Image (tube, grey):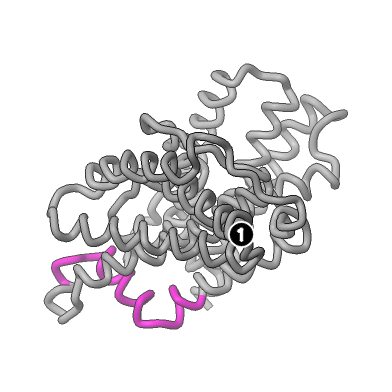
Amino acid sequence: MKKLSGSLRGYLILLLLVVVSWLFFKVITPHNFGSPENMVKYFEAGLIAATGAVGFYFVMVMGMFDFSIGANIMLSAIIGCVFASRFGLGYFGLVFGCVLSGLCVGLINGIFYIKLRIPSMIVTTGLALIYEALANFIGGAVAQTLPSDLRGFGQMPGDIILAFVAFALAYIILNYTKIGTYTYAIGSNEFVAKNMGINVNKYKVLAFVISGGFLGLMSILTISYGSSMVAVTGMQSMSRNFVPTMGCFFGLAFKKYGMPIQAIVIGEFVINIIFFGFIALGAPTAIQEVITGLALLIIITLTSKPVKGEIVK
């Protein structure tokens, strides 16, 4: 009953965040924000980031971080596009190229992190520069455009189907496999996990691989929705890190309610409501970013407030 009560409380909080966010902007700008059609678009946009965020959660819940998220998405999208169009492999090439690239990037991140024994933020920052250069080389410094007949994952129902398959897979891995159990054990107390006989390094690498695979799925949705991807250098790909990372913060905040995956999905929806709300207001980009960042920090702080006497497992 306690678990059910906790989950219900978590859902109510998330629902309240959605309603308050929508109501705030609907009152201020009623004519060009928050219609049923617009809300569906906000939800679809949120699904893209949530697809990658549910995988990145495996890394973050262990206390690690990854600054190469954006570079991974960019590189995977370009490779998937090349496989699909240049090699003529169609949808198979798109899915295979994006997911394979994401998995490889995740594996490289994990191995380098374990072998170099330096903070994950430093390792992935350096590797992000390499991934950007590789994407630039493969793409030939020009935008890679996905043919119009291969953009089925950029619209309903293709995007929803792929996203919810990803969510279901993440939920199953996290709640019904040894990987999920060990992920939480390592994140809770790495020293105790080692004493329990868990191969901590192995599961840290696996966390990066899982994250990479889901980011590969996100890259499919990204290039299908946007139709093209251009390689950038000089760490400009880090601009793609923000939204999936904020979704993961929702997952971490609502872990105590036993619903991190659901919180990530709904959290990304809230993020897009706020984002499109400021667009409807016509606020300058700099102001949008500052206020959005502050609003999300407040949300995460309030939802992360520990319950007195709660035992964290």
Q: Nearer the viewer, residue 92 or 285?
A: 92
How far from the left and from the top, in percent, is residue 11?
61, 60
Q: Is residue 56 magenta?
A: no
Residue 13, above or below 93: above
Left or right: where 129 falls relative to 4: left
Q: Main secondary structure of the magenta part?
A: helix
Q: Where is the C terminus found, in terms of image quarters?
A: bottom left
Of all residues, the one furthest to the front in this rendering is 87
Residue at point 40% right, 56% down? 307
Note whether residue 26 is visible. Answer: yes
**Residue 193, image x and y in percent?**
19, 73
Give, as a three-letter code, the residue at label 1: Ala
Q: Quadrant of residue 213?
A: bottom left
Residue 263 shows in the view: no
Q: Is residue 208 left or right of residue 166?
A: left
At a point 62% along the width and 17% down the height, the residue shown is 284
Identify whether 60 is placed above or below 311: above
Residue under numbered circle 1: 84
Give the residue at x 27% y 65%: 205
Front residue of 53 and 73: 73
- Residues rendered magenta in the picture: 172-192
